[in-house]
Amino acid sequence: MANILAVEDCEETQPLLTRALDRHHKLEIVDTAKSAQHSLDNKEYDLILLDLNLPDGNGFDVLNYLQDKTPNTQTPVIILSAREETEDKVRGFTLGAEDYVTKPFVANELLARIQTRLKNKNKSTVFERDLLKLEPSYQKVFKVVDNQNVDLGLTPIEFKILFTLISSPGKPINRNDLINKVWSSDQASDSRGIDAHISNLRKKLGSPHSRYIQAIYKVGYVYRKI
């Protein structure tokens, strides 16, 4: 389940996006360029749906802001607009958008395009934070020690736990949400199981990263740099 930001001011389109994506992903909707920039400053997203016509500017402003803010990341952007002009599509792709969908859209088609972009992102992205390098396609984590990348030898479960927490730094993750993200529906686990895996994960991370995974009483866990 991905975190998706939709920058959309049309009151008719907003509920359509909610119905199309709500069962599959976590969707946040904002309706201005300013609010989009505020969201991008405070949270990381797996994908962005971007309208071009906004009350305080346009989607190209948001694209420029995203490129300036995170030039080395690869957050997929799908432009979702009623504008069909070729020059708008060319400009969007030039500024880094990966897809362009014209309104009105078909819900299943939009969902399929989103899934494709997310799969491509997971295959190609190398995620780096606090001298850790995560490679989702191989479920490997490397720690920089004396300018060398050292493979920490995480299990697939340990990788998923770390990736989930580190993707939302400073944001507490509920125990049940963490379990649902890490284990598939045909697997079983409980809070004691997640505690055991996090204990092993901390040992493999070592200092200082082991301290960054903090337990929050009666809530869950958070990745927060001390």
Image (cartoon, rainbow, N blue to C red):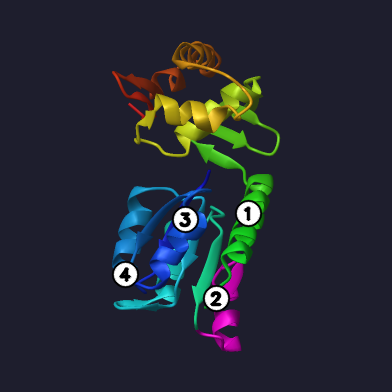
Q: Is residue 197 above or below residue 170?
A: above
Q: CA distance from mark 3 to mark 2?
A: 17 Å
The residue under label 4 is 32
Mark with earlier residue (3, 2): 3
The residue under label 1 is 115
Q: Can residue 201 be seen in the rendering of this structure? A: yes
The structure residue drawn at horizontal position 42% and vertical position 71%, both measured from the top left corner, is: 13
Q: CA distance from mark 2 to mark 1?
A: 20 Å
Which of discs 4 and 3 lies nearer the camera? The answer is 4
Q: Residues within 10 Å of mark 3 (few under 14, many from 20)?
A: few
Q: CA distance from mark 4 to mark 3?
A: 20 Å
The residue under label 2 is 92
Q: Is residue 29 above or below residue 128?
A: below
Mark with earlier residue (2, 4): 4
The three-letter amino acid code for the residue at tag 2 is Gly
How many numbered discs sit on the rendered protein? 4
- x, y percent for residue 188: 58, 19
The three-letter amino acid code for the residue at tag 3 is Thr
Helix, strand or loop for disc 4: loop
Segment colored magenta: 83-101
Helix, strand or loop for disc 2: helix
The structure residue drawn at horizontal position 39% and vertical position 19%, both measured from the top left corner, is: 211
Q: Quadrant of the C terminus?
A: top left
